[in-house]
Image (tube, rainbow, N blue to C red):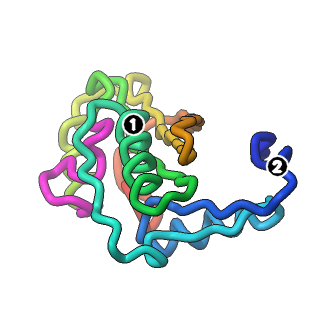
């Protein structure tokens, strides 16, 4: 992943990740290791409140989180929102992926609900994509957004040990 906006800066910059998720913090620090940035997180700013993700799109939620963290810290902030969009469900669960089955972060219930809803859908109609939007907001109110997509199909049973499976 290349970040020309950051590479062109001469001075090392601090960026605050709008998360307290330790795995996400470690992953982004690893990705940014060769960039002229110091990665901070909300652990460094315990007084920043949690952002309520109540927008209709991944981009709106990511921008909202980054703006709130930037305003709280006075530093550039990086936030993400991501989820699964299933073709046969008209893009659901989308921004509701983490709370698809009602309880936020209950991956087992989420994939059980998803598989139940798709049980009668033929294999060739089970297309889906994982979407991630990253928003980088600067104190001067500059907002940059970046998207990533991973296309695939929903299987008939869970695989793997984390996330939607």
- Residue at image position (51%, 72%) is 23
Task: Choose between 58 and 66: the one closer to the eye.
Answer: 66
Tell me where residue 56 appears, x and y as whole percent: 27, 31
- Residue at image position (69%, 68%) is 38
For the residues labelled 1 and 2, the Cα–Cα distance comes to 28 Å
**Residues packed near mark 2 inside 10 Å, few (<14), some (14 to 19) or many (20 plus):** few
Q: Residue 148's quadrant in the figure?
A: top right
100 falls in the magenta region: yes
Numbered disc 1: secondary structure:
helix
Mark 1 or 2: the one toward you: 2
Residue picked out by circle 2: 9
Q: Which residues are magenta?
A: 93-108
From what the image shows, is residue 112 above or below residue 130? below
Residue picked out by circle 1: 58
Between disc 1 and disc 2, whose residue precedes? 2
Task: Choose between 135 and 116: the one closer to the eye.
Answer: 135
Tell me where residue 97 appears, x and y as whole percent: 30, 46
Q: Is residue 19 left or right of residue 25?
A: left
19 falls in the magenta region: no
Numbered disc 2: secondary structure:
loop
- Residue at image position (22%, 41%) is 54
Q: Residue 155's quadrant in the figure?
A: top left
Tell me where residue 161 appears, x and y as whole percent: 44, 68
- Residue at image position (19%, 43%) is 116
């Amino acid at each position: 992943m290349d970040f020309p906006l950051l590479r062109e800066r001469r001075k090392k910059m601090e960026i605050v990740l709008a998360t307290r998720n330790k795995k996400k913090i470690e992953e982004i620090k690893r990705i940014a290791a060769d960039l002229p940035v110091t990665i901070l997180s909300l652990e460094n700013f315990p007084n920043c409140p949690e952002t309520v993700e109540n927008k209709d799109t991944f981009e709106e939620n990511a921008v909202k989180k980054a703006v709130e963290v930037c305003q709280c810290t006075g530093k550039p902030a990086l936030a993400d929102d991501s989820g699964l969009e299933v073709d046969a469900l008209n893009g659901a669960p989308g921004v509701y992926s983490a709370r698809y089955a009602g309880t936020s972060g209950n991956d087992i219930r989420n994939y059980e609900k998803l598989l139940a809803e798709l049980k009668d859908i033929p294999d060739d109609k089970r297309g889906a994509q994982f979407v991630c939007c990253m928003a980088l907001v600067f104190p001067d109110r500059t907002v940059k957004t970046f998207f990533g997509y991973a296309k695939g199909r929903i299987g008939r049973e869970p695989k793997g040990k984390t996330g939607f499976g």
